[in-house]
Amino acid sequence: MSLDPNQALLFFVPLLPTCLFVIWSDLATMKIPNKVVLGILAIYVVVGPFVLPLEDYAWRFTHFAVMLIAGMAFTAARVMGAGDAKFLAAAAPFIALNDAILVGAILAPTIIVTFILHRIARATPLRTATASWESWERPREFPMGVPLALTVLLYLGLRALGLV
């Protein structure tokens, strides 16, 4: 079942600062701390039963399990980092199964745009202002936590506004 605007808003509000921290952390250190990932899951555990019907709430833990296994496989194949995989799993319960294609449609351009902006920013004075950021020093890597966190926020934000 898709989220209605109120449900999406109730998830969006506590996730906003957490996802913004994920973005900053991944840009600055190329890591997403385990405590933050556990915090995202804790938000679902605490807020979820008040927002979703209990059956939907319980079933969405399967989203976590499936994405954790998929993320582990992606990490083993060196497709993504472990922090990205754990973030993906922790964020999965917030997304309705029937919205998976919608989330993919948000994620794909978000990856492209954030990749391009990251590469452009690396060649601007912004780099000197954030010279200690690890993501500038790894030209063959990209902080995937940025588009992943933005996708969760865009999905919930668009749902909260009733735009999707």
Image (tube, rainbow, N blue to C red):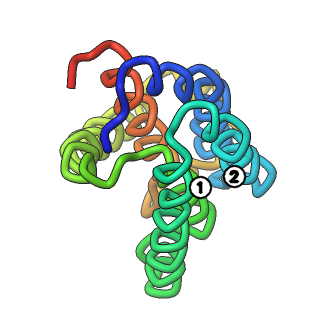
Could you tell me residue 29's position as x and y percent?
69, 48
Q: Quadrant of the N terminus?
A: top left
What kind of element bears circle 2?
helix
- Residue that mark 2 sits on: 37
Q: Which mark is residue 90?
A: 1
Residue drawn at (43%, 25%) of the image: 124
What kind of element bears circle 1?
helix
Residue drawn at (33%, 24%) of the image: 159
Cβ–Cβ below 8 Å for labels 2 and 1?
yes
- Give the residue at the far right of this rendering: 35
| Kind of residue indicated by mark 2 | Val
Residue drawn at (60%, 63%) of the image: 86
Could you say which is closer to the camera, residue 90 or residue 24?
90
User: Quadrant of residue 97 in the image?
Assistant: bottom left
Could you tell me residue 94's position as x and y percent?
48, 44
Residue drawn at (33%, 44%) of the image: 115
Q: Residue 40: in sight, yes or no?
A: yes
Is residue 25 shown left or right of residue 88? right
